[in-house]
Amino acid sequence: MEIIGALLVSTIAGLSTMLGALVIFFKFKSENVNKFITASLAFSLAIMIGISVTDLIPESTYILLSSYGIGKGIFFSILSFIIGFILVKYLHKLMNKTVETNDLYKLGILNMLALILHNFPEGIATFMSSYKDIHLGLKLGLAIAFHNIPEGISIAVPIYYATKSKKNAIFKTFLSGIAEPIGAIIAYIFLSKYITDIFISIILLFVGGIMITLAIEVIYPKARKYNLNKFLYLGLIIGTVLILFNYFCF
């Protein structure tokens, strides 16, 4: 019964990304589409940086420092982050060479890949926490579900406005969300004896490097291209407020 409950918590948390994808069903006048895209990209930018700075990096670094001491702890923290940075640079360069489509679609795909990598260890963490203590797991699952909703927006909006396909946007958002329960299942079948706080911390620091690099080097320049600074700032403010709410309330 503990296994079913833990898997259910992880699945609900992961698939909450689909709630974010529902924004593509909102109707906007043609002159307001770029305003919506700008605000959504800025919102996603704030969410990605905020999650990394308030959640992934501090907690993971603390665990590594506690486990390895200051020297090795800092080394492994920085190394994990840098590998994430390098991966985004490589993927962005690769997509520019191989994907013949517009920038919004590339951005949506990069967001999807980053968030799959993000959700996979989150699924492991949610499952293991729920399996050990269902109350702790529910609290963690709620916090994850809360920030997965805007993550869904960051995938669905650019892909939909690049392809005009709701099915494409929904499917790719689903792929990101389903990574969380898949991580939970793999944790149970293969890794339950080997997963440690150190392992999860290294993965999450790696993901933090991916998300911050993606936000600054890819999402921000794309949002600026529309020259709609008022909506850029609006998205940043809403995203930042949401992150602060998540940080202080969960």
Image (spheres, grey):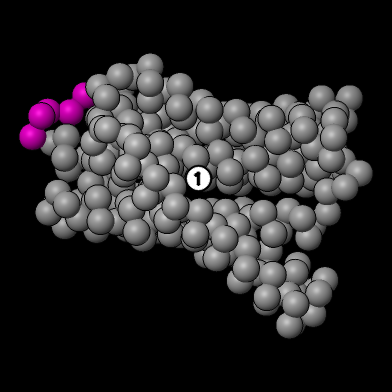
Neighbour class for label 1 at 10 Å: few (<14), some, many (≥20)?
many
Residue 83, position as x, y percentages in the image: 57, 60
**Which quadrant holds the N terminus?**
top right
Prevalent SS, magenta region: loop
Q: Is residue 175 above or below residue 128?
A: above
Magenta region includes residue 82:
no
Q: Which secondary structure, mark 1?
A: helix
* Residue 66 appears in the picture as rendered: yes
User: For residue 220, what is the image quadrant?
Assistant: bottom left
Residue designated by label 1: 114
* Name of the residue lying farthest toward the front: 97
Residue 241, position as x, y percentages in the image: 41, 57
* Residue 74 as seen in the image, left or right of residue 88: right
Q: Is residue 190 above or below residue 171?
A: below
Q: Residue at x 37, y 31 (%)?
A: 156
Q: Residue at x 14, y 49 (%)?
A: 226
Query: Between residues 27 and 111, which one lies in front from this camera angle?
Result: 111
Residue type at numbered disc 1: Ala
* Name of the residue lying farthest toward the left: 31
* Residue 139 appears in the picture as rendered: no
Q: Residue at x 60, y 57 (%)?
A: 206
* Name of the residue lying farthest toward the top: 167
Q: Residue at x 50, y 45 (%)?
A: 114
Residue segment shown in magenta: 26-31
* Residue 188 as seen in the image, left or right of residue 167: right
